[in-house]
Amino acid sequence: MTLIASVLIPNIAIALARRDQPALAEHPLILYAAERQRTVVAAASDDTGVRAGIPLRQAITRCPQAVYQAADPERDRQACIALGNLLETFSPRVVFSMAGTDSIVNLDLGRIGIPRAIVVVQRLAQQIQTSLRLVPALGVAAKRFVARRAAAVSGAGAAVIVPPGYETSFLAPQPVTALPINAEIIERLHLLGLRTIDALARIPLDALQAQFGASGRLLYQLARGGDDTPIGMTMPPPALSQTARFAGSLSNRTLLEAAIARLAERLAVQLDAGGWAARAIRVTLHLEDGAPWSEQR
């Protein structure tokens, strides 16, 4: 049976800030960002008692002893890309997601046994710590939701492997708040006295559908480990390029800018024809007497 590995970086923005500034590990840390004409908490370490999304003023009142820094979303984005690229060396089937402030990457390990999975997980952890200087939490199971939950309960620097067939027993003592469902459904489950996944799993499908409608089937599936939808093949993003070559030496900046503008127009036509949007644009100048110069936006 195919096994799924879930790699979790808890509170990745805080982890990156402390990685780049080790002294911050000794202090409560809060990162803030501007949002809709106000400043809010983008991420907060667990020792602050503050949650992401609240106004910065409120956070300062609650935790005045914390260190406050501006969030760096570009650094976080680049780290997530680097993590995904690293994991693609282990599997051609990788999917990335965010759950609140946590970074999660699921990858298909293929049809391997538990002993082999243990070896792969150890290599994964070592590579992530060596290359990215981040400490992951790891989970392995035959189903994505179970693997993700295994990573969540393992904690940073550890791993939990759930053998195929043991999904229900692993999930049984977990709280229903661990399910990837909205707060309204969680509240309704609590009102019905259903506080653990085991209690939810005992409810027949028709009863869940009668109470929760279309969401009833989802609850029924999650209580038994979630669906078995495989992870699709990771598709490399398309790269479009246009090139211009000058007949001789160039000393006029206006001519260079005009050439770049023409290349940009051609790329725009290609993008429009394919119905695409550009994620990044790179300009490279190949010089006659030196290494190429390149700049990306």
Image: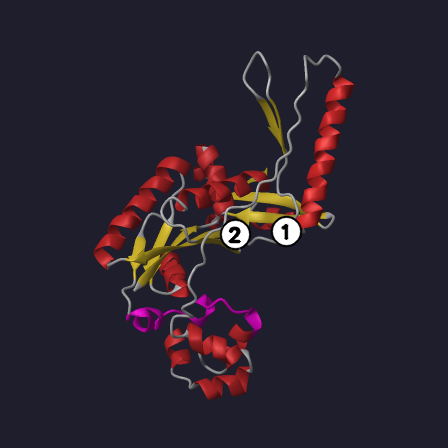
Of residue 214 and residue 1, the one placed in the foreground of this image is 1
Q: Give the magenta part as a residue range.
A: 165-184
**66 above or below 251?**
below
Of residue 57 and residue 212, the one placed in the foreground of this image is 212
Q: Quadrant of residue 75?
A: top right
Q: Quadrant of residue 184?
A: bottom right
Q: Determine the residue positioned at 72% across, 12% down.
A: 251
Image location (x, y in percent) of residue 18 = 46, 38
1 or 2: mark nearer the eye? 2
Left or right of 210: which side holds 233?
left
Sort mark 1 into few (<14), some (14-19) or many (20+) by Cα contacts within 10 Å: few
Left or right of 116: which side holds 251?
right
Residue located beneath label 2 in the image:
101
Q: Determine the residue positioned at 21% across, 55% down.
A: 115
- Disc 2 marks which amino acid? Thr
Which color scheme did the rendering employ for the protein? Answer: secondary structure
Q: Determine the residue positioned at 49% across, 44% down.
A: 80
Residue located beneath label 1 in the image:
58
Q: Is residue 155 visible?
A: no
Image location (x, y in percent) of residue 85 = 45, 43
Magenta-colored stretch includes residue 237: no
**193 above or below 10?**
below
Q: Is residue 36 visible?
A: yes
Name the residue furthest front: 247
- Disc 1 marks which amino acid? Gln
Image location (x, y in percent) of residue 145 = 41, 64
Please give the count of numbered marks on the rendered protein: 2
Image location (x, y in percent) of residue 296 = 61, 32
Q: Determine the residue positioned at 24% across, 59% down.
A: 113
